[in-house]
Amino acid sequence: MNIMPVAAPSPRSYRAALPAVLFVVSIFFLNFLSRIILAPLMPILEIELGFNHAAAGNIFLALGVGNAIGLLLNGFLSREINHNRTVGWSAVIVGVISLFLSQAWSYPSLVCGMLALGICVGLYLPSGIATVTSLVRPEDWGKTIATHEAAPNTAFVVAPLLAEAVLLFADWHVAVLMLAVIQIMLGLLFLRFGKGGAYPGVSPLSSLAGRLVRRPVLWLLVFCFCTAVGISMGPYSMLPLFLVDDRGFSREAANQLLAISRIGAVILPFVSGWFTDRWGAKPALFLYFALCGCATILIGLASGPLLVAAVVLQPMFSVLFFTPAFTVVSHMFNPEERAVVVSFVGPINAFLGVGLIPWALGQLGQAGYFSEGFVAQGALCVLSLALLPRFPSNH
């Protein structure tokens, strides 16, 4: 097969570019589903492979460390093969690593597999953002990024449902194996037919990167992204264990609630995209920090119906961040700079948000302080409101 990407047309309206955007979004959906599928399976994995909550946190720490490494490597790879090919090859490589992960036979092999998976999934994001924004005219970036963000939010819904469905007739290995095969096939199709991103990336060690790190707004973005990724991934990674061991839910009930809680999160990014295009990024970020912070605090403090309400609302509010945040990135940095910014911000928030925060929640859970961990995360999110005046006014 001749694996050559189709040249990207000039940026078009959102409606005209939607098929090409959805092709990229499908890659992101499987990328994200591969990295979170083990979270709803964690109660089973703890029993089968013989580890505790703290060790479960180590698994997500390995994923976060790998993700950070992969994001750093993106600039070197995309510089050589363009963003388009990087998106396609990242899917193929994630699928190959998932094949090996599906055969994990022990806790150490699971940790090593998650580290390798993290590296591979990290290759996607900077090139994915660069690709979708190259397809669409700037005035439609809010809707475009909201569409892109629908991928992880849909994956959050699908993961627990897929896990429970597979467990009805097979074990957890089959769920990972299915994702591996589909990812390889879709990646090969994208390498042949995918559009957008037909320009090279920039090394994070370039002079351009050196100039960007001297801009204070970049460090403001680093902090905000770390907070947002942590408050999305941390609770999701550890909620099944928290609900089962700390609040007395069955595994099936916990995963059902986890899936239900993410349904609204599939739609909210589009509302956030419309709100961002209409009113600007800063008002959208204000809503995010206030609502998501309060809902996360409530998870740690509540029980009974109030806990169920908090678990349902927190994921809905947690997705309000990414559309205005990526819109800020798209408006403040030119196309060459955007991938560098994501490559720079990404490793830090991957290590902290994807890895360290779930690890810390696992340590707290093992020590009997699960609730306090959620309260602390929510309080940090609310306090981040103080940073909003430092954002430039972008509409």
Image (tube, helix red, strand yellow):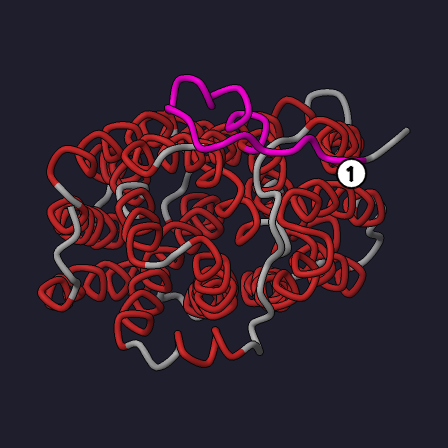
Would residue 209 be seen by someone viewing this image from the given angle? yes
Q: Is residue 228 magenta?
A: no
Name the kind of residue labelled 1 in the image: His
Give yes or no for residue 6 being in the magenta stretch: yes
Q: Residue at x 22, y 29 (%)?
A: 274
Name which quarter of the figure residue 309 lies in: top left
Whole-percent x, y for residue 77 in the image: 70, 60
189 lies above or below 205: above
Position of the C terminus by quadrant: top left
First to last magenta residue range = 4-24
Instruction: Answer above or below: position of 165 versus 235.
Output: above
Most distant residue in the right direction: 1
Say which residue appears at 20% left-offset and 35% top-offset. Answer: 277
x%, y% of residue 71?
A: 58, 62
In which quadrant of the rendered view does residue 262 lie?
Answer: top left
Residue 351 seen in the figure: no
* 90 lies left or right of 277: right
- State the image coordinates of residue 160 (x, y, percent, origin top left): 54, 32
Q: Which image quadrant for residue 57? A: bottom right
Q: Along the horizontal axis of the image, is 220 left or right of 10? A: left
Q: Judge by depth and name the residue closer to the eye, 64 or 91.
A: 91
Quadrant of image for the N terminus: top right
Per the image, label 1 sits on a secondary structure element best described as helix
Mark 1, residue position:
173
* Residue 61 higher or lower than 96, as above or below: below
The residue sitting at 32% across, 74% down in the picture is: 219
At 54% from the left edge and 30% from the top edge, which residue is drawn? 9
Query: How many C-alpha atoms fall within 10 Å of the one at disc 1: few (<14), some, or many (≥20)?
Result: some
Of 179 and 51, nearer the camera is 179
